[in-house]
Amino acid sequence: MNHSSFVGMSPTAQFLERTQGSILERYRQAFTVSRQDSLDSIFEVWQAADEEWKVVEGEQVISENVMETACRFVQTLPLGFRLPSVTGEPDGHINLEWYRNPRNLLTVSIGPENRLYWAALIGSEDPRGSCRFVDRIPKTLLYYIARVFGA
Amino acid sequence: MIDPNNVPAVADNELLARFILHSNETRSDGTVKPKLFLPYSLVELSVNRHREAASDETWQVGRDVAAARGKTLYGISNIRASSCRIETLNVAAKPILPSNPNHADIVGYPQKKEDQISLATKLAAATEGNWVKAPSVPGDIG
């Protein structure tokens, strides 16, 4: 008999296991719903840019590739991370912002060819950079998302 | 408005208006997003000096700018000239004569977008008060 099966035999342990599972499932569902909200926002921004900006000189439409990259970025956010607000940019990028107040924020601009341009302002710190997004969100960005919210 | 024949240099204590032409440049808490201060492919950014301008005149300039670009004027965000003089940035008088002698540019933006975003976050954080909604008819800036 291993330890886990022994624990699972106890009615109290089984109750705790069920409760924990239920809480975790509700948490996952809530996160999935809010993540869907972010994905919907990306889609709306993509459509709005296509409708509003294509006739204005100097402004570019948001490409399907940029929209898909933004969606993959949001889908790749680890469970428990806050979701960003989403806006379009006149240069055809999609902007994701994690904001607590004007001096605690991270802004990531998603451009063509999976390119990310980002800058954070956290008190007097002003880190910035650019990188390519392939499958995983760079650890640096996850670190600064957490920092924005005081983690 | 400033005398078009005698446009002074922009003093540090001057208040400058940045016109808001996209609703997504503002937040619900009254602050503005860094993107309001992004020049994108350019390296300078237009602002309008409040100096010697009646509020109606500033709003009219904003409406003219919006109309010329096929946009809606949502409001303005105010920032002190000294707050714009950070790192590589400076503020220069750039009158558009004869219509707008109060026009100025924030100049010296770097080309790299991440550097532009970084500066824009600092400018957005340095704006004075909440952004001001455009009046439906000419009125006070507040």
Image (spheres, grey):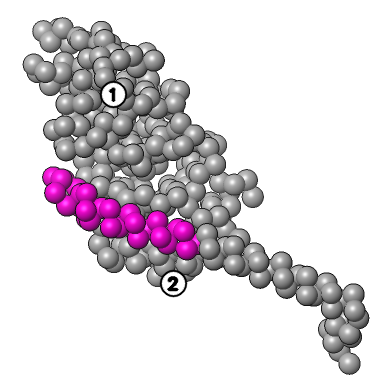
Give the image quarter of residue A65. bottom left
The prevailing secondary structure element of the residues shown in magenta is: helix
Pair 1/2: label in front: 1
Which chain does the numbered disc 2 sit on?
Answer: A
Number of numbered labels in the structure image: 2
Q: Residue furthest front?
A: B136
Is residue A130 shown to the viewer in this render? no
Let me know if marks 1 and 2 both belong to one chain: no
Up the image or down, A4 lies above or below B26; here it is below
How far, Cα to Cα, is label 1 from label 2? Answer: 48 Å
Relative to B23, is A21 on the left or the right? right
Query: Residue tagged by mark 1?
Result: B136
Amino acid identity at mark 2: Asp
The picture places residue A62, in percent across and down from the top left corner, at 26, 57
Residue at (31, 22) in percent of width and height: B135
Amino acid identity at mark 1: Ser
Q: Which mark is residue A135?
A: 2
Give the image quarter of residue A29. bottom right
Q: Is residue A149 magenta?
A: no
How packed mark 2 is, by other alpha carbons closer than 10 Å (few <14, some 14-19, many 20 or more), is few
Residue at (57, 58) in percent of width and height: A81
Relative to A95, is B50 on the left or the right? left
At mark 1, the secondary structure is loop
Q: In which quadrant will I find the N terminus of chain A?
A: bottom right
Is residue B127 shown to the viewer in this render? yes
The picture places residue A103, in percent across and down from the top left corner, at 51, 36
Q: Is residue A46 magenta?
A: yes
Q: Which segment did they paint magenta? A: A35-61
Q: Are marks 1 and 2 in contact (CB under 8 Å)?
A: no
Residue at (23, 25) in percent of width and height: B62
